[in-house]
Amino acid sequence: MIFGADAAGAGEPARGGGEPSVAGADPTRVQPAAGGGGGGAPLPPPGLGGGGYGDGPGPNGAGRDARQRALLAAAGVLAIAIIVVVVLLATHSNGSTTASGSSTTAAPSTTVAATTTTAAPSTTSTLPATTTTTTTVPPPATTVAPTPQAALNAIAATLGPTYAVSPIAGQDKSMFAAIDHPAAQSGGGSTVVVDVYQYLNGAWQPQASVPLGADGSTGLLLPASQHATPITVTALTGSADPDYAVTTASASALITTIVSDQTGKWRAVPFQAPSGTVIGVPDAIVRQTTIAATFNSCTPTCATGGAKQVTFAYKGGTFVPLAG
């Protein structure tokens, strides 16, 4: 045991883990100096030296400090872990936002590509302009030629109200027609003229003009509107071209004259009538190869005489009466 002045040194901690100075003493309270010495110094508080209160290992103080340090270390590690988790969450959130933004901003990139694509016409428009001139050529005017009959009627219409037009005979270049009309005579008065036409190159071409009033045996024409003095087509002479039976009107009968080119020239064919040679016969009936005319027999007189029918046939350039 230590007494007196040596008691102060007894409180020094034992270096290197020395034993406490009082064996079995309660470290929580101050022990008086043994042996009745009143001048002994009190023991230092725990942790400041002395047995069980130094920084060496002890049954209570050192364990409590270790636990506190462990708790503090654990709290620090937990705090660091929480901070790391928060940082990771924040980083992940920012990364998602950034990724989402990247995905969002990717759409304008597509739009820009579309804009670039639509800019191609602008590049094309910089090429030199090509002017295409389309000239519309109107089709040539189509002139519809009148039919031969219409053209013939148009000619007749220029002759005044009194005329007659024959039917068209033949085909192609052998088409013939005749028109009769009044015409003034050189010696005064008027007569009937028959104009003969042939259709050539799409038009009626005049071939002959035959007067009928030379011997006074023919009559006059009546207005065309009456259709009383027509022209008909016949084949009495055997000519390759048509013959025309021309009707005129006298004071007492209708007169028939035959116009033909059987001899190579268009003319009025004469008849050997009972009264002499004439170019017109009264009240005639035209058959296939003959023509019958009705005359006054003048028996016993012309005023009281009866009718006599005579049939004629073409022979030797004239119409002669048949026996019977």
Image: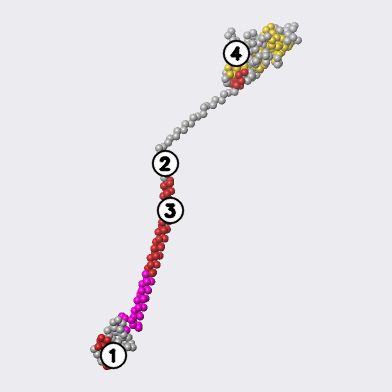
Asked whether 78 falls inside the magenta stretch, the response is yes
Q: Which residue is mark 3?
A: 107
**Image location of residue 13, percent across then percent down:** 28, 83
Q: CA distance from mark 2 to mark 1?
A: 116 Å
Specify whether residue 196 is in view. Answer: yes
Q: Amino acid at mark 4?
A: Ala
**Residue at left offset 65%, top offset 15%:** 240
Return the residue found at the far bottom.
Answer: 36
Within 10 Å of disc 1 (Cα), the crowding (few <14, some 14-19, many 20+) is: few
| Disc 3 and disc 4 in contact, CB within 8 angstroms | no
Q: Amino acid at mark 2?
A: Thr
Q: CA distance from mark 4 to mark 2?
A: 77 Å
| Disc 3 and disc 1 in contact, CB within 8 angstroms | no
Mainly helix, strand or loop, the magenta region?
A: helix
Within 10 Å of disc 2 (Cα), the crowding (few <14, some 14-19, many 20+) is: few
| Dot placed on the residue nearer the N-terminal end, 1 or 4 | 1
Q: Which structural element holds mark 1?
A: loop
Segment colored magenta: 52-80
Residue 124 is marked as 2
Q: Which structural element holds mark 4?
A: strand
Q: Amino acid at mark 3?
A: Ala
Return the residue found at the far left.
Answer: 5
For the residue pair 42 and 225, the one nearer the viewer reads as 42
Of the two numbered discs 3 and 4 in the rendering, the one whose residue sits closer to the viewer: 3
Please identify the quarter of the rendering in which residue 268 is found: top right
Judged left or right of residue 294, residue 182 is left
Please identify the quarter of the rendering in which residue 11 is found: bottom left
| Dot placed on the residue nearer the N-terminal end, 2 or 3 | 3
Q: Which structural element holds mark 2?
A: helix
For the residue pair 307 and 154, the one nearer the viewer reads as 154
